[in-house]
Structures are given as structure tokens and as C-alpha cells.
Image (cartoon, rainbow, N blue to C red):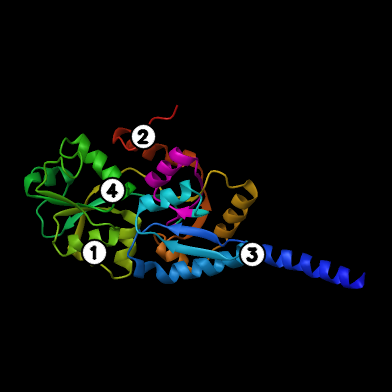
């Protein structure tokens, strides 16, 4: 009898051990707002901090494009994602993804889309640039970027000069893939003008990646709420609350730096992104809610 009991106990312990070993890591996906090298240390720190605060293994990965993160959320292959507002709204439309956290920059939850140009160019406003539009090589970030494409794209569409990369009145249109590359190409006079996230732009200036004296801002959008941290639609409220508490307590400067030079994280929800939703409807990137 003692032998049978011992075997049974070992069997139960083995099952418990297997259950613990088989628990999947909590996965976090981050969009490429900047080049991978610029974000690596902060992402490593975030992975370590969330592992401690969530009490389980956390894996943070930087995805190559916005669409990959949306698909990962839709199929629940990631648990949490850092998305631009437009990308979040696409995921929300497709699978019910939820915004739970965003960041403050200098104490405010807002950023802007800028159109920037080299200081040697003649134009000091978007209107002046458009007077010479057939000589302008225009740069955007990613097709699915809110500040790097959607918001400036809607403005240029309203001006009657831009529909997409194939239909426009510029000398050329290109997509650089990230905000820092756009800024560097404007500074190097490789493009005439570029659209960029304001928080990332100022962060690049502060870090010395670009020289502000060589660039001028010729257009600024209305206020946009900062990028949301997003969970898939089936995430339970207990996990959401735990994540919100974990982010709100973050003070690591390396983590804050790579998310637009954030000063803190705060709670967020779907209602903050209504103006981006309206712009995406106008630009044909979302369908109207029923």
C-alpha cells in the first residue's frame, strides 16, 4: 500500500510539474516605431520588469511591420501589443482588441503628426510646399502608420494632391518604413519632405540622432492620443488590471525613452481614438461601425 501511495504521489507531482513547464510565456509584440537597434535595451528591460510584475515569463518581440502585429493579435498568438492608433483600430474592428494603456509625454497623453523639410528648402508652410508639388519627393513612414501616413495623407487628400503612392501630384512618393529613417532622409536632403510622429521626432533630436538646425516643421496635425497598449478581445479583466498596474508603476528611463520619451504610463480605452477612426473612415482604411 505504501508503495502504491508513493507511486501515486510521484504521478501527481509529475502532472503538476508538467503543467508549470507547459505554461506558455506571456508574449508582447512591439511595432517598429524606430530602428531595432534604437529600441533593444529598453525592450530587454521591459521584458525583465513585466516578468517580475506579472509573476510569469514574458517575451517581448519587435515585429517587422504593423500588419504582422494585427494578425498576431487577431489569432491570439500574442497577449499584448504596442500599436499605433490606426493599427489598434484595425485590430479592434477585426477581432475586438482592447486598448488598456497609453503613455504621457511631458505629462500629456497627446502627440502630433508633423510634415518636416530640410531647412534649405524655400517653403515654410504646407501651402508653400504644395505650390511646387511637382518638384517634391514626399516620404511617409509605414502604410499603416497613424502619424507617418494616415493623418498627413488625409490632409493631402483634402488638398487634392494625394490618394496613394500610385495616384498623386508629387514628383515621387516613398515609404521609408520607420520614423527615424524618414527624419534622416529629410536631414540628408534625400527627400523633399516627410511625415513623422512628433514625439519620436523630438526624441531623435534630444538623442542627437538628427540635427534640429537642419530641419523645419511646416505642418502640424490636431492632437492625437498616444499609441495604445492593446490586448486581444478575449483577455479577462483580472489580467487587464494586472497589466495596467504593472505599466503605471514603470519608472525605468530606458523603457520610457523608447516609447516617445514617455514620462509615465496611464490607462486608456477605445473612446480616445475617435478622431483617428473618423480619419481612417475618410481615407477608406476602416468600415463604419454598425
* Residue 223 position in % (x across, y down): 36, 44
**Residue 211 or 163: which is nearer the viewer?**
163
Q: Nearer the viewer, mark 3 or mark 2?
A: 3
Q: Are marks 1 and 3 in contact (CB under 8 Å)?
A: no
Q: Which of marks 4 and 1 is nearer the N terminus?
A: 4
Alpha-carbon distance for marks 2 and 1? 32 Å
| Residue 33 in picture, x, y percent from top left | 35, 58
* Alpha carbon distance from label 2 to label 4: 17 Å
Q: Is residue 88 magenta?
A: yes
Question: Is residue 112 at all visible to an observer of this figure?
Answer: yes
Callout 2: SS: helix
Q: Mark 4 points at which residue?
A: 143
Precedes in sequence: disc 2 or disc 4: 4
Which label lies toward us, 1 or 3? 3
Nearest the camera: 83 or 11? 11
In the image, 42: left or right of 55? left
Tag 3, which secondary structure?
loop
What is the spatial separation of the Cα atoms under label 3 and label 2, in whole angstroms? 39 Å
In the image, which residues are magenta? 81-106
Q: Nearer the viewer, mark 2 or mark 1?
A: 2
Q: On the rendered image, what quadrant is the C terminus found in?
A: top left
Q: Disc 1 on helix, strand or loop?
A: helix
Contact (Cβ within 8 Å) of mark 2 with mark 4? no
Furthest-right residue in this view: 1
Is 87 within the magenta? Answer: yes
Residue 217 image offset from top left, x and y in percent: 22, 53
Residue corresponding to mark 3: 55
Q: State the quadrant of the N terminus.
A: bottom right
Residue that mark 2 sits on: 278
- On residue 176, the disc is none
Tell me what residue is drawn at x 42 percent, y 65 percent: 257
The residue under label 1 is: 212
Amino acid at each position: 500500500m505504501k508503495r502504491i501511495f508513493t507511486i501515486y504521489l510521484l504521478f501527481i507531482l509529475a502532472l503538476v510539474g508538467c503543467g508549470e513547464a507547459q505554461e506558455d510565456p506571456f508574449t508582447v509584440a512591439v511595432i517598429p516605431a524606430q530602428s531595432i537597434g534604437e529600441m533593444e535595451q529598453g525592450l530587454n528591460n521591459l521584458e525583465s520588469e513585466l516578468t517580475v510584475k506579472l509573476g510569469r515569463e514574458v517575451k517581448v518581440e519587435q515585429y517587422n511591420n504593423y500588419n504582422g502585429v494585427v494578425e498576431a493579435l487577431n489569432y491570439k498568438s500574442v497577449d499584448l501589443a504596442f500599436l499605433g492608433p490606426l493599427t489598434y483600430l484595425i485590430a479592434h474592428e477585426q477581432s475586438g482588441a482592447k486598448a488598456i494603456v497609453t503613455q504621457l509625454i511631458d505629462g500629456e497623453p497627446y502627440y502630433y503628426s508633423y510634415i518636416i523639410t530640410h531647412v534649405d528648402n524655400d517653403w515654410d508652410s504646407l501651402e508653400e510646399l504644395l505650390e511646387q508639388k511637382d518638384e517634391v519627393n514626399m516620404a511617409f513612414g509605414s502604410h499603416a502608420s497613424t502619424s507617418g501616413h494616415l493623418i498627413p495623407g488625409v490632409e493631402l487628400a483634402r488638398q487634392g494632391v494625394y490618394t496613394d503612392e500610385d495616384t498623386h501630384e508629387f514628383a515621387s512618393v516613398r515609404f521609408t518604413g520607420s520614423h527615424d529613417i524618414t527624419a534622416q532622409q529629410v536631414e540628408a536632403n534625400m527627400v523633399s519632405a516627410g511625415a513623422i510622429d512628433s514625439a519620436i521626432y523630438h526624441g531623435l533630436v534630444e538623442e542627437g540622432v538628427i540635427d534640429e538646425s537642419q530641419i523645419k516643421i511646416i505642418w502640424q496635425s490636431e492632437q492625437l492620443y498616444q499609441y495604445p497598449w492593446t490586448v486581444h478581445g478575449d483577455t479577462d479583466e483580472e489580467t487587464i488590471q494586472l497589466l495596467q498596474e504593472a505599466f503605471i508603476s514603470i519608472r525605468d528611463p530606458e523603457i520610457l525613452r523608447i516609447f516617445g520619451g514617455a514620462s509615465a504610463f496611464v490607462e486608456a480605452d477605445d473612446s480616445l481614438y475617435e478622431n483617428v477612426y473618423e480619419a481612417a473612415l475618410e481615407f477608406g482604411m476602416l468600415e463604419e461601425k454598425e
